[in-house]
Amino acid sequence: MDRNLTASSSKVRIPRSDVWSGDSGSVTMLGQVEQGGIMGLFDHWHPVLSISKLSSKPTKITLGGRDITLFRTASGNIGAIDDCCVHRRASLSKGTVVGERLQCGYHGWTYDIEGEAESPGTPKLRACARHYDVTVNEGFIWIKSAGVEAELPKFDTAGYEFVCAKPYAIKAPLEVVLDNFTEVEHTPTTHANFGYDLSRMSEVKTTVEGNEASVRVVNTGPQKKTPWIVQQLAGLKTGDTFTDDWVTYFSPVYTIYEQFWNDPKNGKERRDRYRIWVFFNPINNDETQLVIFAYLRARTAARRTFIQLTRPILSLIVDIEVVCDVKMIESLADKSPEIEGMKLSRFDKVLGMNRERIDRIYRGRSVTTREGVNV
Ligand code: FES
Ligand SMILES: [Fe+2]
């Protein structure tokens, strides 16, 4: 399958409901100014659904507390509009696609991909549902507010082979999920295979470097004990020097991981290197959807073929590790995103840096109070 499908963007047009009136309004945790204000979160592209999951039936997704209907028209265009009919609020995801329009199941009003509504019973009536810009990239449907400028995240996968792309829903706020995915102190005890040796955790070096737009963390230390079969498949050995080097960006919130192993005796890099993109989509204030795109380096044609043949197993290995994180995050005694009151370690410096950028870049708030965290 071509993983970079042709983009299918709807035309640029700002619905009245999205124009910032300049009202201050009240700000929710998701950064939405609720009364006629700008919606920071929707100003970024988010991968919301695998293209393979969108059939001829409309599908509802939830992002930033909003239910949104995705639908594919007869000609193949993809529309994204609020999942609420402007007539009497029926759920449009329960409607039907008829040609180039989505038909509401209640009274039969129809919508095009730009949200323009037509009423069979009152043809002169003019109405419009909020719609979103849509594109397809890496096998996923991405959406953002119609008409806003936003850069689509880049996928530099040259020399790498696709392993898997998968969403996971986690019952925890964005910050709490990102906290887990941007420190390695949990890897000895939380993870099944990838991570550091608990008895040698004090040897693990971690460096954190932030700039205006991103935060980079580089970790190196001894790989923990891992089953023989995983060592063969993942091209590593217990005791290798494991490097987990990542950069987190905030438009939208996502992290790109570079993971590799070196022979501790001669420093030579092992066969495999993973490159993994993890997107953190807030479903609402209490739930976050991860979307993971995993790639594995393939330096030769034979290696590429091997990865293709073993893809289900490699995908399972990635899945096992992610599920370890999901279970741990969901079992936390307190899932408040606030870090005040926590006793933080040397691995947690990134928590405050991430929050400052989530507030400023992702949610578009001007308040920056959480950069400094004493560890
Ligand atoms: S509620 Fe959708 S057409 Fe009436
Ligand atoms: Fe983890």
Image (tube, rainbow, N blue to C red):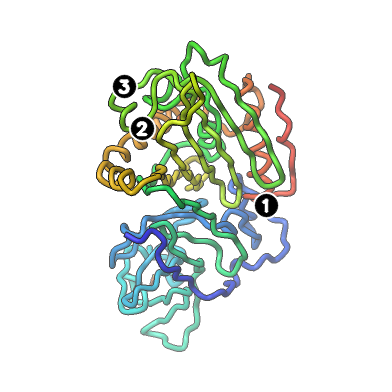
Between disc 2 and disc 1, whose residue precedes?
2
Measuring 52% from the left and 76% from the top, which residue is drawn there? Answer: 11
| Residue 163 position within the rendered picture, expressed as x and y whole percent measured from the top left | 35, 45
- Identity, as a three-letter code, of the amino acid under mark 1: Gly
**Vertical relation: 317 (above or below) 228:** below
Residue type indicated by callout 3 = Pro
Q: Residue furthest front?
A: 266
Q: Which residue corresponds to the image point at 26% horizontal and 41% vertical from the top-left?
A: 310
- Mark 3 lies on residue: 227
- Tag 1 secondary structure: loop
Q: Residue at x 64, y 63 (%)?
A: 36
Q: Quadrant of ligand 1?
A: bottom left
Label 3: how many Cα within 10 Å (few below 14, some 14–19, many 20+): few
**Secondary-structure class at tag 2:** helix
Disc 2 crowd, CA 10 A, few/some/many (<14, 14-19, 20+): many
Give residue 318's position: percent from left, percent from top.
36, 36
Q: Residues within 10 Å of mark 1 (few under 14, many from 20)?
A: some
Q: CA distance from mark 1 to mark 3?
A: 45 Å
Gap between marks 2 and 3 measured at Cα? 11 Å
**Mark 1 Cβ inside 8 Å of ligand 2:** no
What is the CA distance from the residue labelled 2 to the residue labelled 1? Answer: 40 Å
In the picture of the structure, the residue carrying the numbered disc 2 is: 234
